[in-house]
Amino acid sequence: MTMHNQKILHIAAVALLVMGAAMSAAQADDDREEGYSGKHGVKYGGENRGKPVQPAQTNAKFQQECSTCHIAYAPGLLPAESWRKVMTGLDKHFASDASLDAQENREITGFLVTNASNRWSAPTAPLRITESAWFKRKHDSHEINPAVWKNPKVKSPANCAACHPRADQGNFNENEIKVPR
Amino acid sequence: MFRPFHASGLALVAVAGLAAQPAFAESPNEILASIQKEAADTPGLQEFSAARGESFFKTKHGNEWSCSSCHTENPAAPGKHAKTGKVIHPMAPSANAERFTDPKKVAKWFKRNCNDVLDRVCTPQEKGDVLAYLLTVQN
């Protein structure tokens, strides 16, 4: 190998290393933004969703029953107490009757509570994911042009999948967001 | 030599038969018959009517939604949840062979949807009329 070739290889190796570092920094950004803010306490006043948001081992009843009328919202999006409230009020679930029989209800409640957010330290338990501090911060007018919410393809902030194509799998990766036009 | 061959042939036919059968617990007509049975004691019961069922399906009953708000005016076509926009598969058995084949599911959804549309459970007469209507809708 000539000196010239060695030099090219050396430059290429350094370039690859730099690219790799830049890519992992981009991926880590999501974690850093949404996780604990280090020694200075918890983020979003303690109303923070958990991660990973869709557990590796899902539950067939949950998948089937909770995805009939909307996507099966990942359990990590809310704290355990929120899920308990949701599941005891299914006969009037956001103005619709979504009641289950007792056995189905027990099984799904257990799954939701077990996999609820592990970062929620505030004593709050909202019924709507969109009422949480992390949701509001992540979707405020600095992050998202208010016109987006008026797009009929978006329809409602509850329609996660309008912009997060893999929301049904609990994937809200910032790099995969596609805002419809 | 002949007998073992014969037996395995039969087994094959039986397995093929099972595979070809969809795993539906009941047929829509069996479900209709059980609504009929449930209705038997209702005073003033009339024979189930597809025409009455159609009008029930397409009319509001004091609330914001009718059945057709989500299921559309054509039950052989896919519908859309009026609030979430989620696609709902067609209601008419001619367009969707799964419909009205699981008694538990039928009971669950009549309870939920009647509560949403009428703020009460539906009478056996109403349920029978609606199913009679859905059975007449051609794909």
Image (spheres, coloured by chain):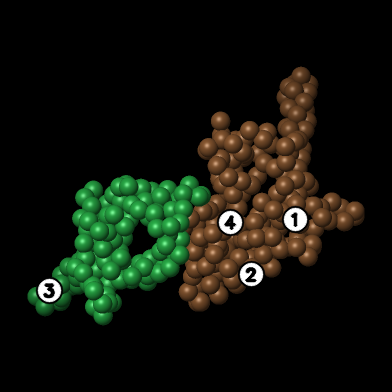
Q: How many marks?
A: 4
Pointers 4 and 2 within a single chain: yes
Residue A156 appears in which quarter of the rendering? top right
Please state the horizontal and vertical placement of residue A65, each as a whole percent of the image: 48, 63
Badge 4 is on which residue? A73
Q: Residue furthest left?
A: B2
Q: Which chain is brown?
A: A
Alpha-carbon span between mark 1 and mark 4: 15 Å
Q: Is residue B36 left or right of residue A56?
A: left
Residue displayed at 76% across by 60% down: A119
Q: Mark 3 to mark 2: distance in Å? A: 59 Å
**Could you tell me which chain the residue with mark 3 belongs to?**
B
- The reply to whether the C-beta atoms of the residues labelled 4 and 2 are less than 8 Å apart is no
Label 2 sits on residue = A84
Q: CA distance from mark 1 to mark 3?
A: 67 Å
**Residue tagged by mark 1?**
A48
Q: CA distance from mark 4 to mark 2?
A: 15 Å
